[in-house]
Amino acid sequence: MTAEFRLRQAWTIARLQLRRVFFSKRSSWVYLLALFPSVPFFGHAIEVKLSQSRYASRVTAAAILESIREGDTDEEVLKTAGEPVHERKFRRGPRGEASVEYRNLIYFDGERRWFLHFEAGILQNKRSRPLIDFEDDRKVFAGVFQYFYLRLAVFFGCLGIFMNLFRGEILDKTLHFWFLAPARREVLLAGKYLAGLIAATLIFATGAALSFGLMLWPQDAVELSAFWRAQGPEHLFWYATAAAAGCVGYGSLFLAAGLLVRNPVVPAIVILFWEGINGILPAALQKFSVLYYVQSLAPIPPPMDANAPALIQLLMSPADPPSTVAAVCGLLAVTALVLWIASRSVQRIEINYGTD
């Protein structure tokens, strides 16, 4: 058989397997994992839109709010700035003593919210905060993408998709039909891997793009337009590429695990532990991790608290991130090695439904 004929066979197997992968009940929860990060960004966007609508009727000039000084009375502030968009009064004091009246006023200047805190009618503190901060939201998205999406959502999503490509067939007692087909077992392996990869990439790249779009939705139109002309398409591309790259690497690991072990919990725990301690491993061992390469493809590094323990900082980021080219080549090399091991295993697999 020629290489071209085997490729056609693998593609035919992939097309036949795609429907099973997309609509399998065992992997239906994968869609929830892919869509879950979009929920908080959608909620944040709705909150910002509602706040903008609610505050629009009571906009106070920024110059007026900047002229207010600590020590002013609440009556002076109300006379100068007018009615706030929100007001709260309460009394507090030690038991048995006269209580003190506290008053909080919130003003809006069209872009920022101003928080004024009064004690006994005297302004004690004034601070302002943007209603929405594009840079902060981008950092939050980078953190959610790297700490949740790559490390957990893509990881367990690939577990659900690729582990069932062979193990699910054994449980359903249908694997022997594939082995009776006039195709070599490594071709069958390639077709199943391709089907899983197409499904996982579409699901998680789409999920990443949806979350990214929801993060951008409530941003200021001028700032968003400038970002989209400069870095927006590039950032969207690399976030989707990083998600797809995670599917490439984790997919190969779990496909091989489905051939080598019966219980998916054991390899999942082992691989998750190995990926989790990647940051504190020697440089040579880090290169045998999918996360080491994948997280380097994200366009923005995740935020890290400078006061966080050193061990946490090591676990959350690679000690020496590879370049983009090195990350892609390294990931493909690791994936090729794992698939070669899987191809050797599939040659020796014997069907015995009674033991599963």
Image (cartoon, helix red, strand yellow):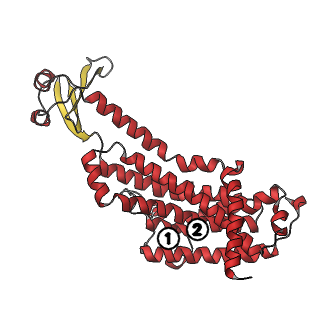
Left or right, 103 with respect to 326, comes to left
Image coordinates for residue 102, horizontal then vertical, percent: 25, 23
User: Residue visible at 53% across and 63% down?
Assistant: 244
User: Residue visible at 41% across and 56% down?
Assistant: 142
Image coordinates for residue 138, horizontal then vertical, percent: 36, 53
Left or right, 344 with respect to 228, comes to right
Q: Quadrant of residue 192?
A: bottom right
Residue 127 numbered tag: none
Image coordinates for residue 117, horizontal then vertical, percent: 22, 30
The answer to whether residue 282 of the structure is visible from this angle is: no
Tell me: residue 266, above or below residue 214: below
Within 10 Å of disc 2 (Cα), the crowding (few <14, some 14-19, many 20+) is many
Q: Amino acid at mark 1?
A: Tyr
Image coordinates for residue 162, horizontal then vertical, percent: 67, 61
At numbered mark 2, what does the secondary structure look like: helix, strand or loop? helix
Query: For the view shown, which residue lies furthest in the right direction?
Result: 354
Q: Gap in Å between the C-alphas at discs 2 and 1?
A: 9 Å
User: Residue visible at 43% across and 44% down?
Assistant: 41
| Residue linked to disc 2 | 249
User: Residue visible at 55% across and 75% down?
Assistant: 332
Q: Quadrant of residue 60?
A: top left
| CB atoms of marks 2 and 1 within 8 Å | yes
Left or right, 181 with respect to 18, comes to right
> Closer to the camera, 73 or 25?
25
> Closer to the camera, 274 or 80?
80
Tell me: residue 231, above or below residue 113: below
Q: Amino acid at mark 2?
A: Gly
At numbered mark 1, what does the secondary structure look like: helix, strand or loop? helix
| Residue linked to disc 1 | 293
